[in-house]
Amino acid sequence: AGRGIGFEAKNLTFRHYPEDAIGLEGVQSGSTLTTPVQRGWIHHVTFYEGFHPNPAESDKRNGDGSLDIKRGEYFTIAYNQFLGAHKTNLVGSSDSSLQYHITYHHNHWQNNASRIPLARNANIHMYNNIFETTNDNQNEASYAQNTRVNAYIFSEANYFIGTKNPSRVDSGAIKSWGEVKYSTYGTDGATVVQSR
């Protein structure tokens, strides 16, 4: 059902979205992606902060995710900016949700609070990105990369500046190669390797 069909989102700007600015959500039965959202290319998009005047959940006052992926495969997220968002990239909505083959490259996260990305049951390659997650007046940064449940990130040649908890590993692993981490603090659970 729809295998091989892809989509592209480019040259957009999102501001004051009440839920997810872009929410990609497929269908799963047990441990099988029956109708996955797939083969997406999201590039040259700018995501500012979300906003909801009367949210059902208090943590959604500043919107929900900038770009979330749930139950899907084969995505490239490139040349985007995430600026001042509360939550940026959720990959996997629950501990059973499956997401595969996701690449983030040449993106810039600045003054975001969390989920850069938060990953569950996923394999992710991140390279040549900038993480500039410092505290500002709206967002108290809590972490950048996070492998929450059975997730694996290959973090290659990224630049972290002033980032709190740059690489948090709860379950799975973050392999780090050729990265610069300048003035980072807090938890850094990445495994630094000497070759790719």
Image: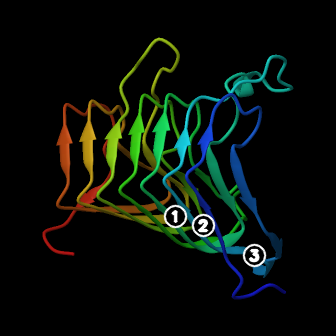
Q: Residue at x 38, y 44 (%)?
A: 108
Secondary structure at badge 3 equals: loop
Of pointers 1 and 3, the one earlier in the residue sequence: 3
Residue hosting label 3: 36
The amino acid sitting under disc 1 is: Ala
Residue hosting label 2: 121
Residue hosting label 1: 151
Q: Residue furthest top?
A: 137
Q: Nearer the viewer, residue 106 or 91?
A: 106
Of pointers 2 and 3, the one earlier in the residue sequence: 3
Q: Are marks 2 and 1 in contact (CB under 8 Å)?
A: yes
Q: Residue at x 36, y 37 (%)?
A: 165
- Residue 190's spot in the image, x, y percent? 31, 54
Q: Crowdedness of circle 2 by 10 Å Cα count: few (<14), some, many (20+)?
A: many
Of pointers 2 and 1, the one earlier in the residue sequence: 2
- Residue 10's spot in the image, x, y percent? 57, 57
Secondary structure at badge 1 equals: strand
Direction from residue 168 to residue 30 in the image, left or right:
right
The amino acid sitting under disc 3 is: Pro
Q: Residue at x 51, y 36 (%)?
A: 114
The answer for how far apart the CA atoms under marks 2 and 1 are is 5 Å
Q: Image quadrant for the C terminus?
A: bottom left
- Any mark on residue 105, and which? none
Secondary structure at badge 2 equals: loop
